[in-house]
Amino acid sequence: MPRDYKRTTDRQSWSQKHMEEAIKAVKENKMGWLLASKTYGVPQATLRRHALGLNKTLTPNTKGLGRFKITFPPEIERQLVAHLKLLETRLFGLTRTEVQELAFQLAQKNGFPHTFNAVKQRAGQEWLAGFLRRNKDISVRKPEPTSAARAQAFNRPQVTKFFNAYEELIVTQKFPPNRIYNVDESALSTVQRPQKILATTGRKQVGCLTSAERGSHLTVVCCMNAAGTYVPPCMIFPRKNMKNELLDEAPTGTIGIAQETGWMNADIFVKWLRHFQSYAKASVDEKVLLVVDGHASHKGIDCLSYAKENGIVILCLPPHCTHRMQPLDVCFYGPLKTYFNQEITKWLKAHPGRVVTHLQIAGLFNKAYGKTATVENACQGFKSTGLWPVDADIFPGHLFEPAETTNIPLTTEAIPDAQTLTTHDSEPQQTTTARSTSPKPRSRSTITLEEEVHVLATQSNQISSIAKSPSPQPGPSGLSVSLETLRPIPRGKFVSGQGKRKPKSRETCLLLTSTPNMDEIKDRQSNKNPTEKRKRKVTKVLFDDDSDEEVFAVECTEDEEDCPCIYCNDLFSRSKPGEGWLRCMLCSRWAHASCADLPKSTKKFVCELCV
């Protein structure tokens, strides 16, 4: 039978409401069988069967053709849909095969009669197609990869803390929308991501011309404000010497900087701040607010000193939250890279036999930038992130659901204000709030780590005891074995000091140009001895010991070539023996394997900044 069956007869075209009225009229002796049949437009024989309860396969007053019927009642299917939605919001969505297996277990454990495959122990494709057809609010989607760090860090307390500081800063400094800026950098490649094309049906492989296998990357720095005004971009090329030809046909006002690796660092950010100052016209009397992410290049003491002297207030976003809270990431860089890929494809078609190099990047970027840098995109970016107009409740509740999997508690410090926001590397006992003589109710943000672990352990014991209880009884859902038992919601266990690295305090949003934060950065740099430049042989473990890959040994100086982790900014010189490091295939920067949430044996690693 075809999946989309079309009826060829008009059997059972009568209304259930008319059938109920006809049965009521017959039972009250108001009409006979024939008169009720003609009055309400229902078949006489069908009316007799329903009124006398002679139908063995259907309940009274319901319709149905054939001997097959839906496996699960509508209320059970609604519970299944709700459970699938909850798993999806926790970033543990089920595939089609897993849904079929869950349906088989649900029918088998709760005694629903079914015709599912007992050998494969899963429902069939026809059941899944019918299930999706009956429930239009779910469909098969391709999910976006989301790192564990982003899933854990984007939580309601973290967002609330940022908006409390942000709102206080807006109120005290009285920043208008044309004085609120956001800056971010992103990578561009000479190799585009191919678009879908029309090709021969059934062909195994379909190709698209690119300039190279991997391509060369460079960094672009873009900046915009909440009123829709853009600062001319900055392009960082991976080379030692800058050439004027690299900026041919670039957007008006674009500056070019040569850097060996092609990525942003503290020295280049100082140059960009001077470029930004020439357009923003900030001063001590008329300050501007610059919202940045937590990259190490934004926290150099020279950058912060220049910003403070010129009235540039720099506010850092919470770590691993830029995919939701940074306007450029939300509404700008996605369309920009799409248009940029399209321009590369057009250029390759117009110039057969040639490849895209850094000499053509500026002109192609100019066309893509002109399509993306609109007033509407800038205003919508600040509006979607709640930065302007200020809206602390811009994010719906389901966006915070992934953080509930681990539910790592914040420190017990009270929420600081905008003037005292900073990151402290203090001892644990210094972060504990002083207890008063009279007990007071505590919020979730003031629960200690030991209490949190105890609560999670108690909950897991309760769940395990319930799962081990014999002869399950039907619950409020009407199921003897619930969906939560068959496919429980994943719960992570908080592990302190994962790996061998020294645990670091979790950074939050902070006012980078505040005096306490700048003093702390100066103290960190003064503790390092700048005169000590000894060379030592260090080994970066790229793969596990049992791997066949080579372990590389490199010569580096602690002061000049010591690379930081792109996630936690911890230096390689402070690594413990055997600690795994991964190198990004695109930007060549290094990161701890534990920070990237990947095993040390990972051979193909791409950091979040290059995704």
Image: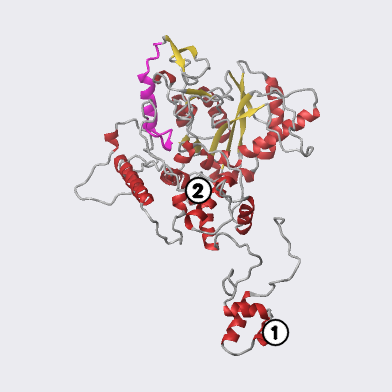
- Residue 527 picture quarter: top left
Left or right of 64? Residue 482 is left
For label 2, the residue is 87
Left/right placement of residue 571 relative to residue 461 reads right
Q: Secondary structure at mark 1?
A: helix
Please provide percent x and percent y for residue 570. 42, 25
* Cβ–Cβ under 8 Å for marks 1 and 2: no
Question: If the image is split into quadrants, where does the C terminus sit?
Answer: top right
Q: Which residue is mark 1?
A: 38
Left or right of 456? Residue 85 is right
**Part of the protein shown in magenta:** 504-532
- Tell me the amino acid under the disc marked 2: Leu
Q: Quadrant of residue 429?
A: top left
Per the model, the C-alpha gap separating discs 1 and 2 is: 52 Å
* Amino acid marked by disc 1: Lys
Residue 81 is a magenta residue:
no
Most foreground residue, 20 or 237: 20
User: Which of the marked residues, 1 or 2, is nearer the chain's N terminus?
Assistant: 1
